[in-house]
Image: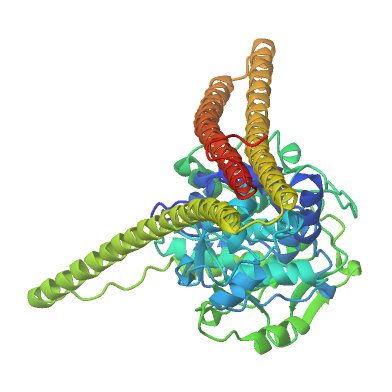
Amino acid sequence: MSTVQNTPFTVVDEAPLQLQMWWYDLGEDGQKWVTKHLGALTDIIKIKPRDDLIEALVTFWDPVHNIFRFSDFELTPTLEEIAGYSGFGRDLRNQELIFPRALSVHRFFDLLNISKQIRKTNVVKGCCSFYFLYSRFGQPNGFEMHEKGLNNKQNKDTWHIHRRFAFIMAFLGIMVFPNKERTIDTRIARVVQVLTTKEHHTLAPIILSDIYRALTLCKSGAEFFEGCNILLQMWLIEHLRHHPKFMSYGLSKDNFIDSYEERVKDYNSPEGVEAWISYLRSLNASQIEWTLGWLPLREVIHMSVLKSHLLLLGLRSVQPYAPHRVLRQLGRYQVVPKDEDLSVQVIELHPEAPLPEALIQQIWNGCRYLKDDTQVPDPVRGEVDPGYAIWFRKRSRVDDVPKPKRPTKRPLVQAFDDKIQERLAWGEREKGYKTTIHALEERLRNLNFEKDLQEQEAEGEKKSLIHKNEALHAQLQQMKKASEVPVQDYDSLLAKTEKALDKAKEKIVQLNEKAESSKDHQVTKFEEERAQFEREKAHWVRSEAQLHAQLEEMRRYNREYQHADFDREMAQARLEQARLRAQLESALDREGHIREIATTRQQQLQDRDQNFQYFKEQVHNWAVYTAQTELERMYRTLGGQPGQAPP
């Protein structure tokens, strides 16, 4: 068992507000579609992350065997537990693996129905930004803003279908397979394609493999946990919430993420990294909830026929998985496990490198399962072989033997090593600076791209008006030329002139109707944006009201029971209330911005109406003048006196 605390690191704190709004904007039908293909995973948005727990837990991670080692027992997340949380793909025997193959930029755009005319620079090192997806599919007006850059056949209903696919990719990239830069790996699009087009494929091996990799990297000093820390947190707390008897939920198909808070509501967890480490060091096997009551136990994976372990293909690496070391978690009799170094089986994956698909599939096809009749009578106690405790103590003594110290180096060699270390440290800092600069440049490119699109739309509207103006001028020129042709018949010329005047009036009416239609469209669009804002505002107002209700309930609870932790909970509630108020103020600022935009658009419409009125008067005056001139010319032709008005 390790006694060394590791370098602090960060985890996914909480779901971005834009991702939560995107989820609610999908509506009931969209949410059902996502749940059909993703299971209950989206409910991890509701779970509050515990970074102190994850940081303390890394202290006990054994990267040689991919397990947690405590005082007298071992634990590790299992495939059955990860699949059970999602409620999707629990029957692992009938599930197929998903291979996250690398995609070209054009193939990535095809899967997301994005036009290939979009710049390839939006995808850097196999990743795109969350804003790249959110601006096109997450925002309610994404269809209007990026209509020319999306392959929706200018159909908003089709866009609503495509935004569901994009949401699954964004959710997995931010909450399940995060990275330090908070960008989204394009290989996730391939994973989403398989989940949404093929049946009986499981996501559990990829999730568990990335969790294993993140634990090992953070054990070595990584600064960010590149795995699903929320699932890991839920898994540990459920094993620490010990029940006197086995809490069996049977073959329930309930959402076990949504009901998680209810199951652990009476568990008093430590606060802070040091408190967690101290608590975890004091644990023994009798304090553990060995088998989770909702876990399906009819068949569980034991090992492979080829090896004593399996190989799990993740998004970023291949990780060994040895469930025979934690059979108590699966409701089976724990035997003395085979002790071998599994770290040599780890394979780091790169986007350009081929995946070892054949080997992974061969091992998966050779999985050995323990049947229902191998369950122990008392899964909560966890039955073990008598020799297990002896083996564990010997194993612990081997792990605790200090490594031999290296001989002292000569001064010159030491100085040389110090310079090398200094250069390496500077190289790491320079790498961090370059990463930050790259992220800022990408953000600037996105902003410039959005600005270019808006300017192109404005330029297109301007060209359209100029084209219409030129067309009307051409019609006037034709009328003028027609008026210069000698006329033989007064009645026919008068009818022709009146017909041209009527056509001009019809054109004016059409222009007025088009202007009114454009004005109504702008007003409708503004009303839709205002309605969307009112819905968001109502949502946050309801959230604030719920928070007030929770605060009052906590006050009542404190008055009745004098709970010792009330002050801390109330402070938490106040912080949450302050956060909601800040979000509400941001929403109010957004309303002000929308009103400014609406005022500007109304002014533009008024200016456009004035221009149309002026143009209408000019066309009418020209038509009258042309008609009078022709009448005078015909009258003179018929013998009238110059300057005398025709009868």
Q: Nearer the viewer, residue 564 or 280?
A: 564
- Number of numbered markers: 0
Specify whether 265 is left or right of 620: right
Please give the name of the residue rendered at 60% of the width and 34% of the height, measured from the top-left corner.
Answer: 645
Q: Is residue 141 above or below residue 119?
A: above
Q: Is residue 172 visible?
A: yes
Q: Is residue 228 visible?
A: no
Q: Nearer the viewer, residue 474 or 11?
A: 474
Query: In terms of image quadrants, where is residue 108?
Result: bottom right
Residue most extreme to the left: 412
Please give the name of the residue rendered at 51% of the width and 53% of the height, measured from the top-left corner.
Answer: 466
Estimate the x, y position of residue 475 in percent, counting from the top left. Answer: 59, 55
Estimate the x, y position of residue 56 in percent, counting from the top left. Answer: 49, 50
Estimate the x, y position of residue 363 in percent, counting from the top left. Answer: 71, 84
Estimate the x, y position of residue 206 in percent, counting from the top left. Answer: 65, 69
Residue most extreme to the top: 559
Specify whether 585 is left or right of 422: right
Specify whether 53 is left or right of 156: left
Q: Nearer the viewer, residue 567 or 528?
A: 528
Q: Quadrant of the C terminus?
A: top right
User: How is the model colour-coded?
Assistant: rainbow
Q: Is residue 434 above or below residue 450?
A: below
Q: Nearer the viewer, residue 632 or 248?
A: 632
Please give the name of the residue rendered at 66% of the width and 21% of the height, measured from the top-left corner.
Answer: 545
